[in-house]
Amino acid sequence: MTPAPSVSLQAVDAATWREVADLAPRPDQSEWVAPVTRYLCLCVYDGLWQPLAIRAGGRVVGFVMWAIDDSDGSHWIGGLVVDAAHQGRGIGRAAVQALLARFEASPGYQEAALTYDPANSAARHLYRSLGFVETGEEDDGEVVARRPRDAVRA
């Protein structure tokens, strides 16, 4: 078994935004993820989402954003993108685990939530293995999955 990669999450700022904007998933994943530049614009203009660069081996290798839903306090994960050249190494899993650890260190944190396209079996498998459970909710045609604070992590 390959050891999990060491990743860190870093706020996207003036020093990293270009590297983040250049990230691209594999072409066959374009139906499930937007270009990273769209996610960055959402972070800037929506005012809700917080952008993070995913670093591994000293390089920016991915992107993820997060937000807190004021109505119920759930911590949302969105826009997870791992650059095509760095996929298949467990970086996405490690990034979600790092983000969950951040959430768990936050006062009042109770639940993480995210969405994915129901046809995206890789996302469904990853998130289920991390303790996310589909709730029957939908958001913009995507499945909503939630993970309570005390869920068992793989």
Image (cartoon, rainbow, N blue to C red):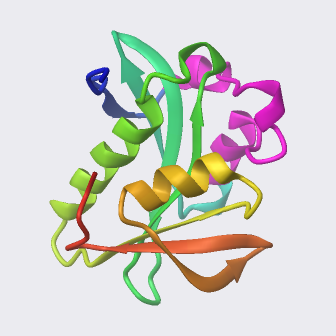
Location of residue 115 in the rendering, given as x and y in whole percent from the top left corner: 61, 65
Q: Quadrant of the N terminus?
A: top left
Instruction: Say which of 113 and 17 sits in front.
Output: 113
Q: Position of residue 129 (x, y in %)?
A: 40, 55
In the image, what residue occupies the spot 35% across and 37% down? Answer: 94
Figure check: 57 above or below 81: above
User: Residue 146's image quarter?
Assistant: bottom left
Q: Is residue 154 above or below residue 13?
A: below
Q: Which residues are magenta?
A: 14-43
Do we see residue 50 in this rendering? no
How far across and down, in percent of the image, does residue 105 sit?
15, 60
Name the foreground residue: 145 vs 1: 1
Is 37 part of what is drawn in magenta? yes
Q: Is residue 23 magenta?
A: yes
3 is higher (above) or lower (below) than 39: above
Residue shown at 33%/75% (left/top)?
111
